[in-house]
Image (spheres, helix red, strand yellow):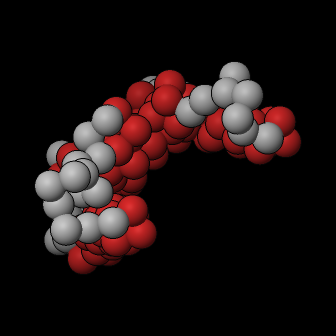
């Protein structure tokens, strides 16, 4: 649950400034655009490091850690799939194509990961 919550916070740190919540460089704050960007990327980096630390140092079983990694990967993959501007004309066509390719390959990986947890063991 902690890994999933941290992955969700990590995604929200990327998404919220694009939803007009970029209050760090507003007219009543002492920050300019560069400082606000540095604060935003600092928050993203801190959340990523906290997530990584939880995966490494949280005392739990190996299966629970693998399940947390699978849930976190699913959240990040779904956020890329649903929120990336694949039809945005402002982005380069090569960049959109590369993200689309790796999103498809990531979907295949996510499917294989969840097959491990949801599939029944078949003994032949």
Going by the image, does 43 lie left or right of 92? left
User: Closer to the camera, 12 or 49?
Assistant: 12
The residue positioned 53% from the left and 36% from the top of the image is 80
Q: Residue placed farthest to the right in the image? A: 94
The residue positioned 85% from the left and 42% from the top of the image is 94
Instruction: From the top left corner, tell me how far across and down residue 75 is, in percent.
Output: 39, 38
User: Closer to the camera, 2 or 118?
Assistant: 2
Q: Residue placed farthest to the front in the image? A: 27
The residue positioned 73% from the left and 28% from the top of the image is 89
Instruction: From the top left corner, tell me how far across and down residue 35 is, in percent.
Output: 34, 71
Residue 11 occupies quadrant = top left
The residue positioned 79% from the left and 41% from the top of the image is 92
Instruction: From the top left corner, tell me how far across and down residue 40 is, in percent.
Output: 33, 62
Quadrant in the picture for the C terminus = top right
- Asked whether the viewer can see residue 87, the reply is yes
User: Closer to the camera, 14 or 50?
Assistant: 14
Total number of numbered labels?
Answer: 0
Instruction: From the top left corner, tell me how far across and down residue 97 is, in percent.
Output: 80, 36
In the rendered image of this protein, does residue 74 appear above or below residue 49? above
Residue 28 occupies quadrant = bottom left
- Asked whether the viewer can see residue 9, the reply is no
Going by the image, does 34 lie left or right of 111? left
User: Closer to the camera, 6 or 107?
Assistant: 6
């Amino acid at each position: 649950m902690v890994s999933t919550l941290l992955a969700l916070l990590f995604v929200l740190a990327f998404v919220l400034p694009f939803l007009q919540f970029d209050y760090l460089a507003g007219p009543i704050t002492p920050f300019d655009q560069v400082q606000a960007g540095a604060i935003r990327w600092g928050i993203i980096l801190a959340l990523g490091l906290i997530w990584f630390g939880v995966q490494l140092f949280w005392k739990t079983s190996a299966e629970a850690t693998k399940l947390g990694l699978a849930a976190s990967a699913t959240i990040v993959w779904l956020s890329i799939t649903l929120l990336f501007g694949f039809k945005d004309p402002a982005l380069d066509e090569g960049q959109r194509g590369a993200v689309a390719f790796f999103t498809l390959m990531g979907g295949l990986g996510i499917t294989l990961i969840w097959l491990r947890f949801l599939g029944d063991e078949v003994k032949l």
